[in-house]
Amino acid sequence: GDSIDAATFIVAKHGKYSTKPARLLTPADATVSIERLQLLDGRTASLRGDTLVVLSGTPAQVQLTARYTAPWSAANIWFAAVPTWPGARTRAIDIGPAATPMVNGTRFTTFSFLAPATPGRYRIFLVMAAESDAAHIASATNWAVGAPAWNDGNDIADWGEAEAAEARRTGHFAPRNWLYSRERGGGRPTDLGVAVIDVLVTRAPVGDATPAPPPQDTLR
């Protein structure tokens, strides 16, 4: 990827550096997109287009390459994978840190998850934020507040189609109520890089193109 300083893009290619004038990037320029997605174990899961199809109650191991732009000049930047199915609210997956500032950088990772027992259509949000770990990201709690605050109306597990559509369109989402203080009115907007992984959980064999019975649509 191309690293940047506060005023210019510093482009590293073939061991040579060149400086090009550029506008100052802001947190609103944070983006994430999935360049490549694949499964490492096909016994209980398959990939149909951009959707992971997983047998209910079984584990799946995913390998992905993400493209990202992190415009923060001095911050701890972290990636997390946040499932949206019941029971997974506090079980976000730590992907780990990312270099910043960065333009069009690459983040490669492998992670595992356990599919829910209830068939349905779900999502995993791949989120990049200026936070310290996956729990603070999934709970939408700034690290300076202390322990993650759950079930306070802003958890990423509660995101629906509107958030997913914006992330698919732009690679970015800016929730309005990220918790920066436990005082009343302590929520305020923040900028995130976000990509979406669609997950279909079924009771039928994953190689069956027509699962039966059809899973309940659990998306909002």
Image (tube, helix red, strand yellow):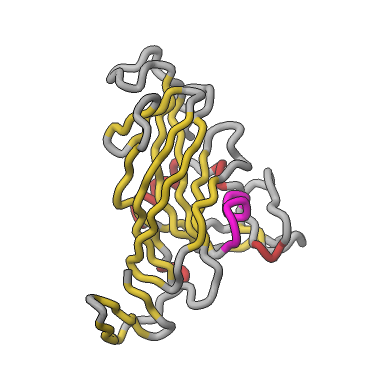
Q: Nearer the viewer, residue 183 or 69?
A: 69
Which residue occupies the foreground of this view, 117 or 114?
114
Q: Is residue 145 shown above or below 16?
A: above
Residue at 45 percent across and 25 percent down: it is 120
Q: Residue at x 38, y 54 (%)?
A: 108
- Farthest-out residue, top: 213
Q: Quadrant of the N terminus?
A: bottom left
Q: Position of residue 143 (x, y in %)?
A: 66, 62
Residue 159 is one of the magenta-drawn residues:
no
Q: Which residues are magenta?
A: 131-139
Left or right of residue 82, residue 68 in this image: left
Image point 69% across, 66% down: which residue?
144
- Tell me residue 75's x, y (percent): 54, 72
Q: Where residue 113 sits in the image (x, y, percent)?
A: 50, 36
Q: Residue furthest right?
A: 183
What residue is at 47 percent from the left and 23 percent from the top? 56
Residue 23 x/y as whole percent: 35, 81
Magenta span includes 133 = yes
